[in-house]
Image (spheres, helix red, strand yellow):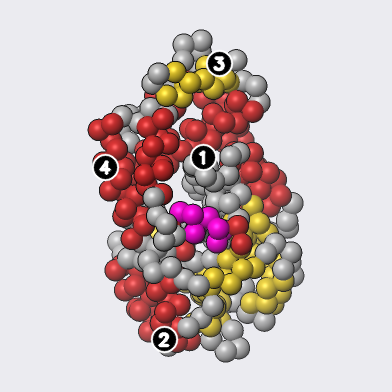
Amino acid sequence: MKLPEWTRFDEEGIIQVKITMAFPLRWVNSYIVPEDEGITVVDPGPHTPAAVENWEQVLAELNWTVKDISRILITHHHPDHYGLAGWLQERSGAPVLMSTRSMQEASYMWGTEGGTDERLIRFFSQHGLPRELSQPMHEHLQGAYREVLPQPEVTCIEEGDKLVMGGRAWDLIMTGGHAPGHLSLYQPESGTMMCGDAVLPQISPNVSLLPGSDPQPFAAYMAGLRKLGQYEVRQAFPGHRHPFLHFKDRTVQLLDHHEARLEQLASLLGEEPRNAYHLCLAMFGDKLTVHQLRFALSETLAHLVELTARGQAEEREDSGGTVYVRR
């Protein structure tokens, strides 16, 4: 069945736009907020032919053109949210807004210096990734890089700033874990939260340990969930799946989920050293695609770092790389 391309939420003044992605996610949510002059676009999606076609179709159906885009707001630097920003900026002239921390992460991951895929593959190899998977992983990462070109010029916004959007003032809330510098937007009078990937209604946001990024992503993500859970939210607009009502309950569910994952991983540790790759397969199974393996291994590493910080695991180096034992 073909997905509907857009849904209007009149009370919140928000239009949800479904931008095509590959299975299993199927789509990423972008949002349009009509302004007195032009429109604000939140998280335009990846730079792919399908996403470009989606935007051309939706803008035409809503009687706008790309020139009506007056501002592009990015919650975080991942390709499925950030990737099309530069392409839209070139055609609209609109400023691209994101947090300083998120801009720094985008520059590190996708900037002109490059080398992100080599750094990540060396990092994974240190933690047990078999040599025969290095080339498939490299090709996968190169595909992600193509989805963020061209790079936009960024105007930085920060937590504590007030952003007027759709004639109302929104609070900017910064969290980490899923992505350093992730911004959620909260409108206190209506209780509306645009939460990007910080809180998702059905799936658990990935929490990754990556070289050169946040050294304690699990702790950052859990702190962010507790922070966001303090807000009175009537309607939440996430980066994936459908808008939802049970925002506070969902933050608690995600906290419980990750603590359970942490306990599961701790139970797999013993006195015999095991590397993160083997622990990842024990956690997530051995039928992972390269795409799935990238995120599963990064999340296993994030949890291992947390277990080490809590004194439940010990990290060691041996001739084969980094390994972990129960402490």
Residue depth check, mark 3 versus mark 2: number of the one nearer the observer: 3
Quadrant assignment for the C terminus: top right
What range of the chain is rendered magenta? 102-109
Q: Amino acid at mark 1?
A: Leu
Q: Amino acid at mark 4?
A: Pro
Q: Residue at x 57, y 35 (%)?
A: 258
Q: Residues within 10 Å of mark 2 (few under 14, many from 20)?
A: some
Q: Is residue 123 magenta?
A: no
Question: In the depicted view, which residue is nearer to us: 25 or 47?
Answer: 47
Q: Amino acid at mark 3?
A: Arg
Secondary structure beneath dot 1 equals loop
Which residue was labeled with disc 1?
209
Q: Which label's residue is closer to the chain start, 2 or 1? A: 2
Image spot of residue 102 (x, y percent): 56, 58
Secondary structure beneath dot 2 equals loop
Which residue was labeled with disc 3?
326
Residue 253 visible in the displayed image? no
Q: Residue at x 31, y 29 (%)?
A: 130
Q: Which label's residue is closer to the chain start, 4 or 3? A: 4
Task: Name the side, left or right, on which 141 lies relative to 78.
Answer: left
Image spot of residue 143 (x, y percent): 31, 55
Q: Which label's residue is closer to the chain start, 1 or 4? A: 4
* 4 and 2 marks in contact (CB < 8 Å): no
Secondary structure beneath dot 3 equals strand
Which residue was labeled with disc 2?
65
Task: Name the side, left or right, on which 149 lies relative to 185.
Answer: left
Determine whether 190 is above or below 240 in the image. below
Residue depth check, mark 2 versus mark 1: number of the one nearer the observer: 1
* 3 and 2 marks in contact (CB < 8 Å): no
Question: In the depicted view, which residue is nearer to us: 3 or 29?
Answer: 29
Residue depth check, mark 4 versus mark 2: number of the one nearer the observer: 4
Which residue was labeled with disc 4?
136
